[in-house]
Image (spheres, helix red, strand yellow):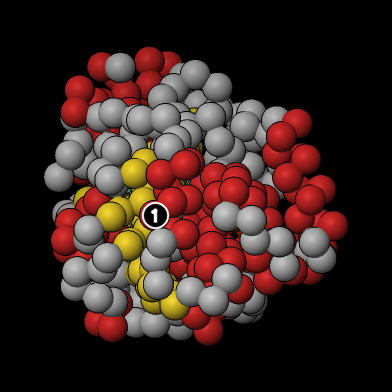
Amino acid sequence: MVTTRAMMMTTSPDWARAVAILDGAEHVCLACHIRPDADALGSMVAVASALRDRGQGVVASFGDPFVVPAILTFLPGLELLSPPDRFPARPDVMMSFDASNVDRLGGLARSAGAAAELIVVDHHATNTGFGSVNLVDPAAAATAVLAAELISRLGVPLSREIAVGLYAGLVTDTGSFRFAATTPTVHELAAQLLRAGVDPAAVCRELYDRAPFGYLGMLAAALGRAQLDPAAVGGRGLVWTTVTRADRERAELALDAAESVIDEVRRTDDAEVAVVLKEDDQGVWQVSVRSKDVVDVGEACTELGGGGHARAAGFSHTGRAGEAIAALKGVLDRA
Ligand code: 5GP
Ligand code: MN
């Protein structure tokens, strides 16, 4: 696994080569990162729909666990998904969405390694440039921005179906147009997507404003055991909590139900860094890390075997939650 800063590289987008490869492809195999979020899955289904609209064959998938998160089941175009065991072992043309390195494709990383052409579409600054063509731009607010550019260059008109996938990615990765990446270009793209038929209230209600009743109990348990360490991160403060498997099992919730807990925890005025450790069904901690103004958590998480952006990143930890927090504090104090 590529984890050191020195090994990273980001190449500038090579649109012409990507378009030429896609123009010449009869079939395209699309993959996004495991445990996909709205940007990964939305961007992938949008491009899959665009290619299908041009009459091309598509196979779209993501590595196990092959379960669409509950809040993303409203996305149009999900019928284009197939399970990862049906994904070709040696695709002629493969695409990767929102994955900063090949390992983030999970079980589909082998197909990526064997693909004749691999078009990587991503906006992580830590992207390793693992494609034969890299459409990678860390200045893009979301992978959806790059997917929209590609669809436009392919000459495919924005259907409502395409636009909803792109909008879901755009709204999520900009924190509902709140984060620093919310440029005029972002709002211009949002306007185009609304003109193509996106109902923003309906999309945001699906993404943010619904959960089963059991979610309230899980959230209460997680927030109730939050801990603040004001001395951590050189005195800037770190707040953290866990969402255990038991918390979820009481309400029969899947791991993705814990995704939004970080958005409550990171409110904490007393902490520059917020962390939520989510225990997955295998007992592994999936760690979400956020910062506010100064700390590069992407770099810190990369050192711990994960990755992400300066203000939003993550890593996995097998063992005790306290160990993961201690390791993260150590890295952040040295930074
Ligand atoms: P989240 O906390 O929402 O799962 O992830 C925040 C950001 O960090 C996203 O850009 C996500 O792709 C990235 N990220 C989360 N976990 C990992 C990980 O284990 N490895 C890598 N490379 N990136 C991660
Ligand atoms: Mn993204």
* Residue 114: x %, y % from top left: 16, 61
Residue under the image location 60 percent in, 73 percent down: 53
Q: Nearer the viewer, residue 85 or 309?
A: 85
Which amino acid does the dot numbered 1 rest on?
Ile
128, 29: nearer the viewer: 29
Quadrant in which the N terminus is drawn: top left
Res 9 quadrant in image: top left
Quarter of the image with the C terminus is top left
288 on left or right of 184: left
Residue 208 percent across, percent down from the top left: 67, 61
The total of numbered circles placed on residues is 1
The residue indicated by pointer 1 is: 21
- Residue at x 40% of width, y 72% of height: 26
Q: Is residue 58 above or below residue 295?
A: below
Considering only vertical position in the picture, is 38 above or below 136? below
SS category of the residue bearing label 1: helix
Residue appearing at x 24%, y 26% in the figure: 5
Q: Position of residue 173 (x, y in %)?
A: 58, 46
